[in-house]
Amino acid sequence: MNQLEIIEKISKNFTEDEQNEIQKAYKFAYEKHKGKVRLTNEEYIMHPLHVALILSDLNVDKATIIGALLHETINNGDTLENELEENFGTEIAHIVRSISTINKLELPDNKESSAIYLRKVLVGLAEDVRVLFIKLADRLHNMRTIWAVNPEKQKRKANETMTVLIPIAHRLGIYSIKSELEDLCLRYTKPEVYEDILRQLNASIDELEDVLETMQDSISNMLVENDLKFHIKSRVKSVYSIYKKLSKGKKWSEIYDILALRLIMEKESDCYLAIGLIHSKFHPLPKRFKDYIAMPKENMYQSLHTGVFGIDGNIFEVQVRTNEMDEIAEKGIASHWSYKEKGTKKIQSMMEQKLEIFRNMIETYKESDNALDFAANINDDILGDLIYVFTPKGDVVELPKDATPIDFAYRIHSKVGDTTIGAIVNEEIVPLSYKLQDGDVIKINTNKNSTPSEEWLNFVKTTGAKSKIKAYFNKQDRADYIENGKNILEKELRKQKLSFAEIFSPEKIEKICNDLKLNDLEEIYLAIGSFRYTAGFIIKLTTEEKHDVTDALIEKVRNKNKNIPKLDNKNDIVVGEHNDILVTLAKCCKPVKGDNIIGYITKGEGITVHKTDCPNIKEKEERLIGVTWSENVDNDYYTDIYIEALNDKNYVTDIINKASTKNISVVSLTTNESAEYTTYNLTIKVKNATELNDFLNSLYSLSFIKKAGKK
């Protein structure tokens, strides 16, 4: 298909005025890409043309088509945004700028970076849903032509597509793009598997198509006899769908739904008639009937699904829907996206809800260093198994499997979640930790004076609910920290006999904020109240003395051993069969749960617990007693470690940052320098020996670390 034929096909469903605007965009893009050639040896303009062609099949609006034609003019056409705005208006310029920004981002190879990238991409994509449409079509055409690049890039792009873009296509219900992308990604990430499945399919394709045709004729004759108008499609299951079943341990001979039929009916009522007729002739498989017409998915997907034993005992997957339902099923809400058509407020509202789910995921993890947890939650919320439940008014709500009434309440509204006091499911009172089931009807009881419970974080499933619960308590904590910080600072000023007005003039507040990357005086109070910085250090920053953030970190933890709070380790240790005997963890070797330990009977002070290799208990066998760690407690323990590092610079900040990523609290820190290296001595708080060893091993990922171990 040449350029003019593509433009003609793209434009055919638009008015004459709209066609003129599309022609204008095409000519603009053609001039910008003139003389440039893709690796496929095609003119560069063919890429945006094919992206627009893919989108035209989704029945998107004019702005999306024009955005697709222009989407490479900034990155590969040296076009300025104001030039686009002058020629096509603010709306188009914004869409093109957004897609240009996203196209500059790439997914790194390692998993942690991949998750961080996923966060960035989702934030970028959530600005305008039409940017999502263009990005998906752009990637689909690039994957169709990815044979032109080297194998390494093929795999990298396929991995990026699977991790970032296919979940979005899935969530928006654009299954025509999602399905093709899945097959293409499998082809380039697991070429041997892809070819093997294709080979097995091709080996029986003639036989399968014969069976499909016979089944299709049988159903068609039955529907014609009953005066039903319909259109019927048949297909063999996609390569990727078969791969997913094989990867779950199924054998080829156990995949029963390779054969699929789809009936497109004139009316919704005809769908039910057709299913009834099919079930009357072909025995249905148990638990395979799904009614997504009466209970549509949140992405507007509607269809009847069943599985039946058909011709020659083969199992067929049968879907029955109307033409409009088929459009939405294949193309998602993109097929009905228009800012100017009537009746689209509901569609836009649903899209905003979907994008809000993405934003909530981002909000929960944007301050977190644990990117792998972030990726896991994305997969749970977007790609995990879903259930469909109802409000008392019959509105359907989509939730991940094992979601609770609290997840449901927060999906309805933040205020409903915050004030929840109870739940009634199917007219029965249930605990708030109850795991909801498909088809449940949920009524939430609220009290305007009630507030969330931190216990909810132990059982809620959705990222959105976690985000809102944490936000509530963060807000409460913030207010307390600010008030506490203000009191601490004022007390320190009185102690040093200093005037607040003099020390905290607007100029000096600005200096503190610049030095510590804070925004205002309130954030200074917050930093003091949350013990991020001491009041003394903040005051020193207003003088001419040289202090920096590293000094603050050292000040925060250095020489604080005398102030380490005492941990209550009662019941941590079992002596014989008793866990209520007075025990103390030895300060010399500081054992942590998981270490091999022995008890030392101390007169008048109960039992002191040492590590079995502690030198202080050698040759004292007569006062030793066997002890073990209790399995039923999960406490914190203080222990001492040392780190030997290069002495070319101060690495305090790097070490504390590494501890933070492993959720290790640094209680005290001192340094000793020699000609060869610097030794950092730390007291840290850990849960057990496994957590301690994991932290020590992780330190070796820092290039300046020479040695690290427990004292």
Image (cartoon, grey):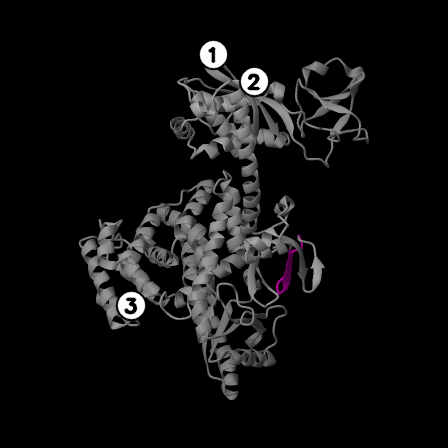
Mark linked to residue 380:
none
State the extent of the magenta-drawn residues as a range. 433-446
Say whether residue 405 is left or right of residue 86: right
Q: Secondary structure at mark 3?
A: helix
Gap between marks 2 and 3 measured at Cα? 72 Å
Q: Quadrant of residue 308?
A: bottom right
- The answer to which of 315 and 251 lies nearer the viewer is 315
Whether the magenta-drawn stretch holds residue 562 is answered as no
Say whether residue 697 is left or right of residue 600: left
At label 3, the amino acid type is: Ile
Q: Quadrant of the N terminus?
A: bottom left
Q: Label 3 belongs to which residue?
A: 10
Tell whether label 2 touches label 1 (CB within 8 Å).
no
Q: Label 1 belongs to which residue?
A: 674
Q: Is residue 8 visible?
A: yes
Say whether residue 442 is left or right of residue 114: right
